[in-house]
């Protein structure tokens, strides 16, 4: 039996300031395996109360436009973060990794969306950061590990 091939890595990010080490690890793993890196940020929908308030005061077209503009801003933020990473972290390196980075913004429950996107893109590995509090990972991390049908690599982050 041959060893599994790693062709696609799903890297999940909250876009917080503490995720740079996780991104570095994702880039290194993608370079090591000569794999495509898919960067996923999940936006959770507003709760029922918030949605009811918005629907009572705003027209459906305006709600849709605000939603679409918000997702576009998140995508732009991701692209800026990738560029900043290369500018800040890799400027002094002798070589720059030649990897493909695709960006996806998902919407829904974080753990469900991560597992769903991993299945959709047929990721060979999920790489995510996790705050470790009292020896326990975040709820999202625990849920992804529990329900993913592929390896999950967890990088501890400060927070």
Image (tube, grey):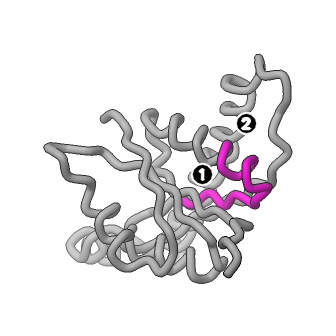
Q: Residue at x 67, y 43 (%)?
A: 28
Front one among 49 and 87:
87
- Residue 60 in sight: no
- Give residue 43's quadrant in the image: bottom left
Task: From the top left corner, tell me how far across and down residue 33 is, in percent.
Answer: 74, 55
Q: Identify the residue position indicated by label 1 in the image.
A: 73
Q: Identify the residue position indicated by label 2 in the image.
A: 83
Find the magenta span and give its range.
28-40
The answer to whether residue 106 is left or right of residue 16 is: right
Is disc 2 placed on a helix, strand or loop?
helix
Q: Residue at x 39, y 67 (%)?
A: 110
- Check if residue 116 falls in the magenta segment: no
Label 1 vs 2, first from the N-terminus: 1
The answer to whether residue 54 is left or right of residue 124 is: left
Q: Is residue 104 above or below residue 25?
A: below
Task: From the top left corner, tell me how far across and down residue 10 is, in percent.
Answer: 59, 63
Is disc 1 placed on a helix, strand or loop?
helix
């Amino acid at each position: 039996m041959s060893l599994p091939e790693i062709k696609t890595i799903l890297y999940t990010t909250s876009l917080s300031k503490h995720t740079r080490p996780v991104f570095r690890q994702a880039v290194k793993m993608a370079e090591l395996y000569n794999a495509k890196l898919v960067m996923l940020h999940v936006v959770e929908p507003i709760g029922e109360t918030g949605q009811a308030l918005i629907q009572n005061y705003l027209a459906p077209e305006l709600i849709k436009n605000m939603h679409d503009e918000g997702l576009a801003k998140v995508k732009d933020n991701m692209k800026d973060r990738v560029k900043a990473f290369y500018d800040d972290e890799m400027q002094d390196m002798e070589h720059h990794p030649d990897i493909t980075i695709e960006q996806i913004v998902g919407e829904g429950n974080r753990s469900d969306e991560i597992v769903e996107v991993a299945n959709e893109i047929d990721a060979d590995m999920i790489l995510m950061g996790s705050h470790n509090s009292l020896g326990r990972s975040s709820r999202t991390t625990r849920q992804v590990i529990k329900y993913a049908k592929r390896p999950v690599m967890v990088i501890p982050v400060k927070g």
